[in-house]
Amino acid sequence: MKAATPRELTHDERRVALTPDTATKLIAAKLQVAVQAGAGAGAFIPDAAYEAAGAKVLSHAADLLQDADVVLKVQAPMPSEVELLRKGSVLISFLQPATQGDIVKALAARGVTAFSLELLPRISRAQSMDALSSQASAAGYKAVVMAADRIGKLFPMMMTAAGTVAPTRVLVMGAGVAGLQAIATARRLGAVVSAYDVRPAVKEEVQSLGATFIELALETQEGEGGYAKEQSEEFLRKQRQLIGEHIAKSDVVITTAAVPGRRAPLLVTGEMVRGMRPGSVIVDLAAETGGNVELTVAGKEVDVNGVTIIGTRNIPSTMALTTSQLYARNVASLLLHLVKDGAINLDFTDDITKGSCVTHGGEIVNERAKQVVSAA
Ligand code: NAD
């Protein structure tokens, strides 16, 4: 069975879905592995490293994809790539089935069995495959590093002969995987950190990282599977009112709030940004799904009365060396879960296989993706 990884075509994507380390793992499981020349370049992995691991390096994506039983990617394939996939082949990547209706439809029509890492159930057995977590964790770390780079002050308290410097105050909104990593990173840099989430279950985790958990007089918004549920506009309005004073007191605000499959909730209005001290920094990790901050511009850094709002897209791609290593391991774990004796063996009674599969046998098999396609 042949597994292949082409170069990513999305312009800001530096990550790669296969590393020499995971190529070795797949080869040990009796797979043949091929990669397109230059596929690892964005992650600083030379072709020679793949060859040394036993993978074939091919120049053209067409030769690679037309021959592959399994294709491993980071971003959803482009239409030109879908046309090259073989009927009955397997694709593993981020697919964003909630928004990429056309690509999902094309994959089904092509007879590809596609697995989306966003749909993988967050159960203990699937932890090694959990690419949302591995990438969110890196993004949470980087958000703090970006804020520390932009803010005109030190994070830690410092006592010097010239006087004492007060520590930076960081507020993290949304204490899921990215938020918790942001808290840990900001604490390591010496900041005074507070955090808020609509799920009170995270209070102890926040406190165990040395941050203060902000409790607002609001009803909890815990939904299914440990995620937040979609909140009403009335709830968000009250939340903005109550969190306003905490935002005004902060030097750095990092927002990571999300509800699966929905637009990011609006947590910070333009007026709240104008209430912050000049020199403050906001990093909006939800920039790509609509933004938690009203004035965020996805892919840009904007200045509002001296407050910098960072809306960088695809932050995991900016740490491609580490995020590729983690992502490739997630992908290899899922693939090996689907393989028995060197061949694909799909068991749709298994939660991981069933939960993450989007298209199979010419059909869209995921309910949410079906709704998106029929609504389009
Ligand atoms: P996410 O990216 O969907 O959301 C990020 C955070 O935003 C969540 O904590 C959510 O509660 C919060 N949020 C939503 N609306 C908000 C609002 N209005 N104000 C403030 N915060 C708001 O979530 P995630 O980081 O992917 O993880 C969500 C959950 O899944 C967590 O409980 C996490 O521990 C759990 N998880 C479990 C496993 C596992 O293997 N068991 C693996 C990964 C994650």
Image (cartoon, helix red, strand yellow):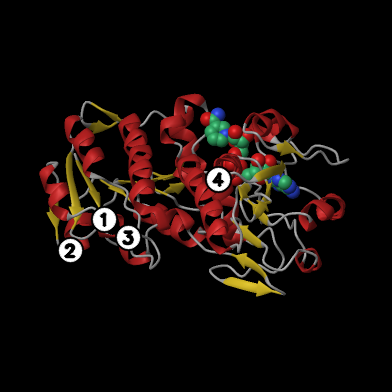
- Where residue 140 sits in the image (x, y, percent)? 54, 47
The residue type indicated by label 1 comes to Phe
Residue 352 in sight in this render: yes
Position of residue 126 in the picture relative to residue 186 (left or right): left
- Spatial CA span between label 2 and label 4: 45 Å
The residue labelled by disc 1 is: 44
Quarter in which the N terminus is drawn: top left
Query: Which numbered disc flags the more N-terminal residue, 3 or 2?
Result: 3
- On the image, which quarter does residue 339 sit in? top left
Quadrant, the C terminus? bottom right
Q: Residues within 10 Å of mark 1 (few under 14, many from 20)?
A: some
Which numbered circle lies on residue 189?
4
Label 1 sits on a secondary structure element that is: loop
Horizontal relation, residue 306 to residue 113: left or right = right
Between disc 3 and disc 1, whose residue precedes?
3
Q: Eyeballing the image, is 78 above or below 188? A: below
* Earlier residue among tags 4 and 1: 1
Q: How many marks?
A: 4
Residue appearing at x 26%, y 45% in the figure: 19
Q: Is residue 182 left or right of residue 351?
A: right
Q: Secondary structure at mark 4?
A: loop
The answer to whether one can see residue 113 in this image is no
Q: Which residue is mark 3?
A: 8
Question: Rounded to the nearest whole Å, what is the CA distance between mark 4 and mark 1?
Answer: 27 Å
Q: Residues within 10 Å of mark 4 (few under 14, many from 20)?
A: some
Distance in Å between CA atoms under marks 3 and 2: 13 Å
